[in-house]
Amino acid sequence: MPPTSTPARMKRERTTAAVPAYRVHKAKNLGYVRLDGRMVYLGKAGTEQSHDRYRRVVAEWLATGRVCQTAGANVEGRGATVAEVVEGFRRWARSYYVDARGRPSPGLGPLEAAAKPLCALYGSTSAASFGPVALRAVRQVMIESGLCRNVINQRVACVKRIFRWAVAEELAPPSIITALGAVDALRRGRSGARETQPVRPVHDCHVEAVLPFLPPTLRAMVRLQRLTGMRSGELCVLRTCDVDRSGSVWTYVPPDHKTAYRGHDRVVRIGPRGQAVLSPLLCPERPTAYVFSPARAQHERLDDRRRAERRAGQDVRTFKEAENGGRRYETRSYRRAISYAIRAAVKAGALDAAGGWHPHQLRHRHATEIRRARGLDAARVLLGHRSLEQTLEYAEADAVLAATIARELG
């Protein structure tokens, strides 16, 4: 007679899968529990001490996200390896680095990328023996792969982050934090790593040259970002219900933004010119719908192609529209759409090949303009920064003003 799947039995099966059972190694007369596929010995089988240790080990295993932190003392006489530490960190990070909707946040990407060369070189090495020389060897692999200096520094910091987590979970000795902290970041011109140019504000003439090659929805996104300096992620999640239109200056509170996890507030202020761009796209009938829809942009693009064929006297073709255009733009799809328009502008001769730009440069342009008109602190407030040092990376000094002062006082 086949076994029945009663609710009680299903519950027992789930419990067994969730919490590993106390087991006995008959040949050695030792109690053990299998965690992460490894045997953790608990002492003489059946004794009260072994059962106490079992409960303690399982509780620690569950508390650390199912990472076997007792591996260093109980698994084949060796400590946890770097690969084991990285795997445990990955499991923890995938549940920690998420946004308000439970999706992986951008902070997870550099951590995953940093773990690859780390495991490739030192995966089988004991985590306790990983030190500054090993970290510099991992960094050298990154340099030879052609990564730029800033990215390398970011990924080396991620490696240090992994080992700080390992120390907190008792998978590595505390001394490793001090040892790895002795490895300084790469300095400009002294590292052998590839250098990149800092992000510069885009010239308005380059923006205007690309706008005719964008559908109206994307055109409005570019103009609004240029006028407000908001981040691309804040722009993409804009909804009608998030915009307060009661005052002369509208305010937009993004439901999710870059520093939300730190408890920071973010308010974007939209002036008259920005209001003129945004107002036609707002939909009070659907307040929770995203304002900038890829499906609408695609429809506009196909309409433009049909009108162009009519003007040329050609037979108007029927274009198949994508069924899943997406409810909203992501930062990558927004940037990709602008890249397509830039290539079209270059091909048509409306833009020089050296005049390409990306959306983040619009934020830099806005910051520079505000700094020129109202000073650095005003730029800091409008960009939502906490420090002037952060704003200095966005708002360039006015070279024209500096030259004027030099002529007058020099």
Image: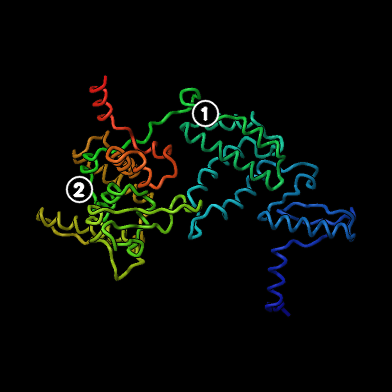
In this rendering, the count of numbered labels is 2
Q: Residue at x 48, y 36 (%)?
A: 151
Callout 2 crowding tier (Cα within 10 Å): few <14, some 14–19, many ≥20: some
In the image, which is nearer the foreground, mark 1 or mark 2? 1
Q: Which residue is mark 1?
A: 186
The C terminus lies in which quarter of the figure? top left
Find residue 206 and report its horizontal and vertical position in percent.
23, 39
Query: What's under tag 2, amino acid-wise?
Result: Pro
Callout 1 crowding tier (Cα within 10 Å): few <14, some 14–19, many ≥20: some
Q: Are marks 1 and 2 in contact (CB under 8 Å)?
A: no
Residue furthest to the front in view is 409
Name the mark on residue 212: 2
Query: What's under tag 1, amino acid-wise?
Result: Leu
Task: Please indicate whether residue 383 sits to the left or right of residue 279 in the image.
Answer: right
Task: Please indicate whether residue 277 sits to the left or right of residue 189 in the image.
Answer: left
Q: Residue at x 60, y 30 (%)?
A: 183
| Distance CA(mark 1)–CA(mark 2) | 42 Å
Along the viewing direction, whichever of 148 and 16 lies nearer the viewer: 148
Secondary structure at badge 1 equals: loop
